Amino acid sequence: MPQLFENDIIYDYSPAHTLNYLHRKYPNPFATHVVSVDTIDRRVDPESGHMRSERVIGVKQGAPRWITKLFQLPPVAYVREIIFVDPEEPSATAMSVNLNLAQYVSCLELITYTPYPRHSANPKQTLFHQHALLLSAFPTAMIARRIEKASLDRFGSNAGVGKQGFEWS
């Protein structure tokens, strides 16, 4: 059964400040699971002013020890992240998917950064809204459920790390 992780955080910073931070999120001393960040592409549409950024992020995969031993998993998992920034709104949408280990678990993540309160003329805060869908296609249902649950737990434990890193920057 797929697992869904949801998380909302209100940043006490304006959307403009928060969106500026997005591309400096890593490295930070709190996200010790992030081992590399490589920007593949970054461009601004000259007509709309929208920015699209694509990165590959290397993370120490946090699978339980029994899983890493059983399946001889590599120590690093890679995630493709695409961020769209709308400076007019100002808002951003980030989408990510794991590039390796998908034969064990697929993680599809969607994050939005929007002004908070939503219809304020001059919002002083930003709403971070995160959805992650975790799905294992492992043929044994019992193991698939355990992999999904372990992945969900890992998302939960990393949820506060992003805010700590933001506060640090």
Image (cartoon, rainbow, N blue to C red):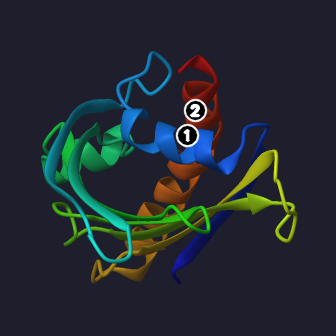
Indicate the position of residue 95 as horizontal and vertical percent values.
40, 68
* Mark number, residue 50: none
* Residue at 73% across, 38% down: 13
Indicate the secondary structure of the residue bearing disc 1: helix
Q: Which residue does the numbered mark 1 point to in the structure image?
A: 158
Amino acid type shown at disc 2: Val
Q: Of all residues shown, which one is farthest toward the front?
A: 47
Q: Closest to the observer: 96 or 169?
A: 169
Query: In which quadrant of the rendered view does residue 124 lie?
Result: top right
Indicate the secondary structure of the residue bearing disc 2: helix
* Residue at 38% across, 76% down: 48
Q: Closest to the observer: 56 or 40?
A: 40
C-alpha separation, residue under disc 1 versus residue under disc 2: 5 Å
101 left or right of 22 in image: left
Indicate the position of residue 11 as horizontal and vertical percent values.
74, 42
Q: Which residue does the numbered mark 2 point to in the structure image?
A: 161
165 versus 108 height, above or below: above
Query: In which quadrant of the rendered view does residue 38 lie?
Result: top left
Indicate the position of residue 131 as horizontal and vertical percent values.
58, 69
Query: In which quadrant of the rendered view does residue 45 lie?
Result: bottom left
Q: How packed is label 2: few (under 14 Cα within 10 Å), some, or many (20 or more)?
A: some
Can I make out residue 21 in this image? yes
